[in-house]
Image: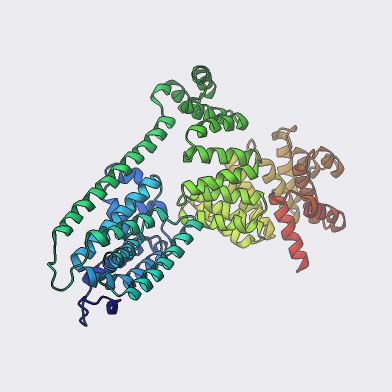
Amino acid sequence: MESGVQKQDTKSGYMTPATSAIVAANIVMFAVMAVFTGSQAITGPNNQTLIDFGADIGIRAMYGEYWRIVTNLFVHIGLLHCFMNMWIFAVMGPNVEKIYGVFKFTLAYFFAGIVASLTSIYMHPQQISAGASGAVFGVFGLWFGFLLANKSILQENFVKSNMKSAVVFLIMVLASGFMRSGIDNAAHVGGVVAGFLCGFLLSPSFPGDPRWRKKDFLGLVVMLAIVAGAFYLSYVKTHKVTNLQAVVLSPADLKEPTSYLKNNKPQEAIKLLDVVLAKQPNHPQAHYLRAHAFLMLNNEEKALADMNQTLKKFPQMLPALQFKTQRLINLARFQEALTVADKVVAVAPNESLGYQLRSSIYDRLDNTAKCLDDANEAVRLDPDNANAHSIRGYAYMNLGLADDAVKDFSKALEIDPGLVGAMNGRMFAYFMQSDYIDCDKQCMSTLGKVGMSDRCAPFAVIMAAICRKQLRKLPERMALLNQAIQTLPYKNWPFPIIQYMNEQIIAESVFQQATDNDKMTEAKTYVAFDLLADNKGAEASPMIMWVKEHGNKAFNEYDMVSALLLKLKK
């Protein structure tokens, strides 16, 4: 670079204190995070940790925590993130600092970083942003500005070659960001544009020129105006978004139905909301509240219909998108749910819940690779989230990795001992390991916590009964089955399977009562495993093969059958 700057001071030993200080500050901050968070700082801190250490998020930065606009430039999301930013900056920074001088370079760096932060807030007010990349891109922009502002002085070949290589690099980085979620391209673009402007506003002094000229002071005024304008736009946008959501969640004109919902009186809330919607059919806040009221009454279809009305007004509203995704999952409309889940991830790429939802959808669509990818991302973003670990446990089960599944379910229950999904998951995973003792213990633990009235209770009874037959604990098995027969509602599925195990009906009767593919998957699986516990492999084999060929692949029963067949092959 220096050979092309004909009039630039290029004496050997020129120090670059600004670059060194900035790199050192970032390394110190990373070290402090590592001291307080351990391995989390290396693999990627969760959202709360990032916020605690000064990351940027519009809904806090624009509500009084203005310092986040600067502090986020020193907070990184893992070791690789920090290393890449500092490596690029350490390569590029010294050359540009030599040209502009310490003060102008430092001023341009922080100007670009602040504009990058404000651009990110404007584009994504609810998204967490962290890292020096916006300011680092500003250094690239500063170099572009220098080349163009001084092209009449510099060698033509030098300008062209440097511009070409830098532009190619930037295009590659930005393209990568647009193709991957979780990359804050808004900050990158804001930073490079801000740095480019500085290249003109703070053009360097060549030998013989005064260090500060009138043009430079005018540039400072313009820079302040740009920061003020960017701050104003980000402030207004953030408050607009949060005010809209605040209105939806607790509208002043809908206090009474909101109060009914808080007091678990959905029917009373619906009556009042019907009156509001009769007068204002497109009232998004009323639709939002009524959606939650219908959900409390377990009416998934009506809840979804109301939330769709809210989304017509607020198509990017994160809670509404999350609500819709979960309703579609519960209604088994998985392709539609996947489309909405993609929007959830796009709106909040640093939030774990979107990846959790999408992973569970891929689970049901039997896309095991993407299911595990999203589950891993959910855990990375929020390693203390019990549901994220539970979802990854199911992803491991899909892949037949029962040992890994047990670890994740155990971690989930360590975080939240009452998480029913993790209890069920660990029960199935133990069974896949042929660990009938721990499986039985988990079944009884689940029944002890949720009781016989819970919808998962019959399956815990069935699994415990099979385990006890495998362990030759027949009196304990019969005692549990008799208790279940007396307690569980006989009209509900899978009561016929329990009747079969209690020797009240034959297998064919169970299959006749399995009125759809899902029930048949469960019936064939449990009858087969009960037969296998009696060493009746010949009778069980056709049922096992039916499940493998025709069963619902999204069911845990299918995973257990697959694990069994894999063991037999070995």
Tell whether 362 sits left or right of 533: left
Q: Is residue 68 left or right of residue 442?
A: left
Pinpoint residue 188: horizontal percent, then vertical percent: 38, 57
Please state the horizontal and vertical placement of residue 162, each as a whole percent of the image.
36, 72
Asked which quadrant contains residue 369, the reply is: bottom right
**Residue 327 visible in the displayed image:** yes
Q: Measuring 44% from the left and 57% from the top, which residue is drawn there?
A: 183
| 28 sits to left or right of 560 | left
Q: In this rendering, would 214 be left or right of 357?
A: left
Whether residue 416 is visible to the viewer of this picture, yes or no, is: no
Image quadrant holding the N terminus, namely: bottom left
In depth, the one of 267 and 533 nearer the eye is 267
Q: State the image coordinates of residue 17 (x, y, percent, origin top left).
A: 21, 71
Front-lying residue, 511 or 98: 98
Locate the C terminus by quadrant. bottom right
Residue 68 coordinates in the image, percent (x, y):
29, 51
**Near-viewer residue (533 or 219):** 219
